[in-house]
């Protein structure tokens, strides 16, 4: 009888953790959606969404971790495994090489078959002449810095906090799929169906996190993907 009660208590505990994660995600997305909508009519609010995404994706999970006696290290925010993260055959070194190869391929074929090789860009960019270029200016530097903040905060939120909560009930594979699905849905704050494609790189980020035990590698890979897309979109205009 006591064994059954203990099993029931454990199940209720894991369910409450899933509810907690779902509630935190809904609140974060709800606040960001409200800021996005308000920013369309109030220019002053327009720049708050990015800063709010970084703050809420970083600070809210920490509060809920602390309530359960946990800290950011439990969610993978740790820097004592950087050697393994960087030097692993499928770690950041391989990810950086893949991004460099992608940019080189786009540079080589962009002029002859631009439309066929730019399927990852926004629809509005497809009809623009493509000339791969890298112009260093303060605007680009600001966007790169903003992408760094967003990448690290999102990885802490999804591959860190959310995945930790899911793994307290489910296995790594199911947890990675659930976090990736919510990650993709969260990108619909900019209403465009093609943004759901981020589900697939999210699985790569989850794999990096599970392999290294830290979200640092996943965060840097996420950042490199964002910068790659940023450079490609800038080249399309």
Image: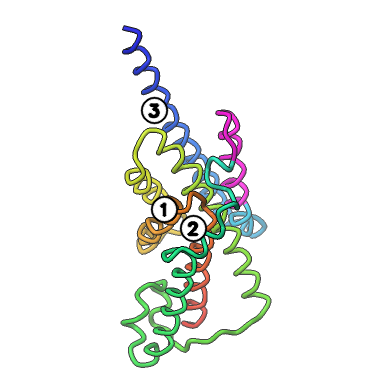
In this view of the protein, can residue 19 be seen by the observer? yes
Mark seen at residue 218 = 2
Residue 120, quarter of the rendered image: bottom left
Q: Is the residue under label 2 in contact with that under label 1 (CB below 8 Å)?
A: yes
Q: What element carries label 1?
A: helix
Q: Quadrant of the N terminus?
A: top left
Magenta-highlighted stretch: main secondary structure? helix
Nearest to the eye among marks 1 and 3: give it: 1
Residue carrying label 1 = 206
Residue sitting at the far bottom:
112
**Could you tell which of marks 1 and 2 lies nearer the N-terminus?**
1
Vertical placement of 39 versus 175: above or below?
Answer: below
**Could you tell which of marks 1 and 3 lies nearer the N-terminus?**
3
Nearest to the eye among marks 2 and 3: give it: 2
Residue 131 placed where, x, y %? 47, 89
Indicate yes or no whether the magenta region holds residue 189: no
Residue 75 placed where, x, y %? 52, 43
Write the start and end of the magenta stretch as one range: 52-71
Compute the Cα span from label 2 to label 3.
27 Å
Q: What element carries label 2?
A: helix
Identify the colour scheme used: rainbow
Q: Is the residue under label 3 in contact with that under label 2 (CB below 8 Å)?
A: no
Name the residue at 47% across, 53% down: 212
Compute the Cα span from label 1 to label 2.
7 Å
Vertical placement of 190 versus 114: above or below?
Answer: above
Residue 106, quarter of the rendered image: bottom left
């Amino acid at each position: 009888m006591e064994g059954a009660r203990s099993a029931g208590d454990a199940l209720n505990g894991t369910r409450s953790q899933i509810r907690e994660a779902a509630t935190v995600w809904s609140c974060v997305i709800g606040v960001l959606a409200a800021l996005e909508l308000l920013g369309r009519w109030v220019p002053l609010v327009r720049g708050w969404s990015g800063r709010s995404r970084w703050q809420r994706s970083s600070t809210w999970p920490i509060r809920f971790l602390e309530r359960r006696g946990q800290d950011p290290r439990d969610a993978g925010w740790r820097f004592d495994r950087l050697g393994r993260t960087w030097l692993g055959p499928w770690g950041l070194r391989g990810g950086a090489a893949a991004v460099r190869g992608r940019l080189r391929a786009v540079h080589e074929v962009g002029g002859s078959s631009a439309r066929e090789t730019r399927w990852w860009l926004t629809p509005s960019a497809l009809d623009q002449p493509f000339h791969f270029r890298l112009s260093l200016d303060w605007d680009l530097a600001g966007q790169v810095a903003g992408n760094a903040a967003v990448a690290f905060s999102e990885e802490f939120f999804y591959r860190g906090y959310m995945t930790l909560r899911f793994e307290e009930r489910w296995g790594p594979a199911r947890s990675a799929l659930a976090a990736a699905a919510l990650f993709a849905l969260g990108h619909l704050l900019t209403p465009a169906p093609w943004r759901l494609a981020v589900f697939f790189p999210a699985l790569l980020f989850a794999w990096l996190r599970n392999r290294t035990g830290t979200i640092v590698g996943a965060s840097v890979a996420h950042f490199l993907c964002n910068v790659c897309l940023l450079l490609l979109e800038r080249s399309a205009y």
